[in-house]
Image (cartoon, rainbow, N blue to C red):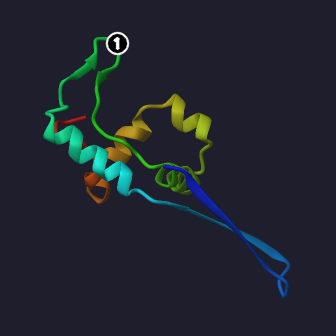
Amino acid sequence: MSVKETLHYDQLSDVVTVHRQQDVDPILQSVREHKDRGADRKASESMGYFVGTIPAVIVEEYCKQEGITYHEFCEDSSHVRRILSDPDYKKFRIWEGRL
């Protein structure tokens, strides 16, 4: 689940562009396995329900679009709910209930 980072340098504009790429197939496979096992049960009393996995590149893009830091993302669970409730990211959800 590592993120591959590539730097591109444009000599004409003297601009460096960072491109990050993540293979999400292992995450999708894990989601399918959790669904097959009926993983919509509580992981533990303190953790609550395990509802999905959000790839790092999606979190990074979300933070950039929202103009927030990763720390702010982690401090406010509404960001996670917002991503996991988005129909575009349904494939990363294990539990289909209301968040």
In-image side of 70 versus 11 (left or right): left
Residue at image mark 1: 46
Q: Secondary structure at mark 1?
A: loop
Rendered location of residue 39, percent (x, y): 19, 32
In-image side of 69 versus 24 (left or right): right
Q: Residue at x 26, y 52 (%)?
A: 90
Name which quarter of the figure residue 15 lies in.
Answer: bottom right
In-image side of 67 versus 51 (left or right): right
45 shown above or below 31: above
Q: Amino acid at mark 1?
A: Ser
Q: Quadrant of the C terminus?
A: top left
In-image side of 81 versus 10 (left or right): left
Of the pair 72 and 50, the residue shown nearer to us: 50
68 shown above or below 98: below
Of the pair 22 and 12, the residue shown nearer to us: 22
Q: Residue at x 26, y 54 (%)?
A: 91
Q: Residue at x 56, y 54 (%)?
A: 3
Rendered location of residue 46, percent (x, y): 34, 12
Rendered location of residue 43, percent (x, y): 28, 21
